[in-house]
Image (cartoon, grey):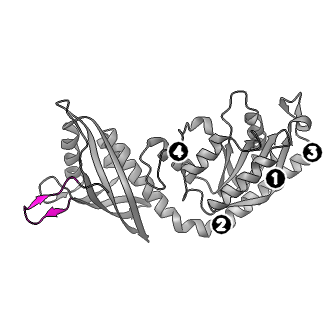
């Protein structure tokens, strides 16, 4: 069954969007052909765009990515502010790329002229993100659809329009399914690498242990030549964690290739932070390769390798390069 997110696109105090989103959700709950869930941007306090596409250095981006990845289509509830959509909504759209691709989207708008001008602009943005916007739109003028300009009282014609909009969003979400399936594995793998990063930052060995296979083989920069098995891998991480009072980890240029139950990826990674002796270190950029297998329906890391370039003349590693 397809899953549709009802995105509440305003974060403004006193917003009327909550009652509009509630009306959409209550009407959608009568259906049996899809699952619906309200996604409130207030629950995802994103700063002004602070990411590059697909790299996701920050926890707030990974949380937003994981939320949007769960859905097959969307209904956006948006007001119109100064002839446009809310800045928070445009910002939330800009944070992601692949997570929006090949999904359907419909619009329920409200405002002085029903929010029509906000939706005109949103359609252009969604087209650039490979979202398929459906034709039917629900527009709710404040003067006619809100009692005393405050309480939503939608007319019957808008109830009919909403049902048609939901028909189209559900139908198109299902029809686009084959196109989305090609990117599902990559989305899951990116989320998996994100969970590795979160586990390192939190020094959470239990969380990290769930992300590797029991027989993982790791070629790390720390001796010995290999760390065989998940216990050896976690022991290696534990030794690294013991060296830091506080630490951070970042990934750049992650590239993934999937095929059935096997996948691999490569990226640059850097461990940095404050050592136990109080000295701050920027760490060094390393080259990282991941090999994954899908085991019992879940992707797990079965091999990883970390390296730095070698200066042949001196025999030493080169640790001052930046991607």
Kindly indicate whether the residue at mark 3 contacts the one at mark 4 (C-beta within 8 angstroms). Answer: no
The residue where tag 4 is placed is 49
Mark positioned earlier in the residue sequence (1 or 3): 1
> Which of 121 and 307 lies nearest the eye of the viewer?
121
Alpha-carbon span between mark 2 and mark 3: 30 Å
> Which of 56 and 222 lies nearest the eye of the viewer?
56
- Left or right: where does residue 276 sit relative to residue 174? left
Name the spot of residue 146 as percent of width and height, x first. Answer: 87, 33
The residue where tag 1 is placed is 137
Say which residue appears at 19% left-offset and 51% top-offset.
Answer: 232
The residue where tag 2 is placed is 176
Name the spot of residue 236 as percent of width and height, x first. Answer: 19, 48
Alpha-carbon span between mark 1 and mark 3: 14 Å
Mark positioned earlier in the residue sequence (1 or 2): 1
Q: Is residue 199 visible?
A: yes
Alpha-carbon span between mark 2 and mark 4: 28 Å
Mark positioned earlier in the residue sequence (1 or 4): 4
Alpha-carbon span between mark 1 and mark 2: 20 Å
Disc 1, SS: strand
């Amino acid at each position: 069954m397809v899953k549709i997110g009802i995105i509440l696109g305003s974060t403004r105090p006193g917003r009327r969007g909550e009652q509009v989103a509630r009306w959409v959700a209550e009407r959608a709950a009568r259906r049996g052909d899809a699952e619906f869930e309200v996604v409130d941007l207030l629950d995802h306090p994103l700063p002004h765009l602070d990411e590059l596409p697909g790299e996701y250095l920050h926890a707030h981006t990974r949380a937003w990515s994981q939320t949007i990845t769960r859905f097959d289509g969307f209904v956006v509830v948006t007001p119109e502010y100064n002839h446009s959509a809310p800045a928070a909504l445009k910002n939330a759209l800009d944070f992601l790329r692949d997570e929006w691709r090949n999904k359907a989207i419909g619009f329920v708008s409200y405002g002085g002229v029903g929010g029509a001008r906000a939706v005109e602009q949103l359609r252009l943005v969604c087209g650039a993100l490979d979202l398929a916007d459906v034709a039917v739109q629900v527009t709710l003028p404040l003067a006619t659809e809100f009692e005393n300009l405050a309480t939503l009282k939608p007319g019957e014609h808008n109830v009919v329009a909403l049902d048609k909009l939901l028909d189209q969003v559900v139908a198109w979400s299902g029809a686009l399914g084959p196109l989305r399936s090609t990117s599902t594995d990559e989305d899951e793998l990116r989320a998996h690498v994100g969970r590795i990063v979160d586990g390192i930052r939190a020094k959470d060995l239990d969380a990290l242990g769930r992300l590797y296979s029991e027989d993982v083989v790791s070629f790390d920069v720390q001796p010995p030549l290999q760390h065989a098995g998940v216990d050896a891998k976690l022991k290696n991480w534990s030794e690294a964690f013991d060296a830091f009072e506080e630490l951070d980890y970042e990934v750049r240029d992650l590239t993934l290739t999937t095929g059935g139950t096997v996948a691999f990826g490569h990226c640059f990674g850097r461990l940095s932070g404050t050592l136990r002796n109080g000295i701050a270190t920027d760490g060094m950029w390393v080259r990282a390769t991941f090999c994954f297998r899908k085991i019992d329906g879940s992707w797990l890391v079965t091999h990883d390798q970390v390296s730095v370039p070698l200066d042949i003349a001196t025999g030493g590693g080169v640790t001052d390069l930046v991607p």
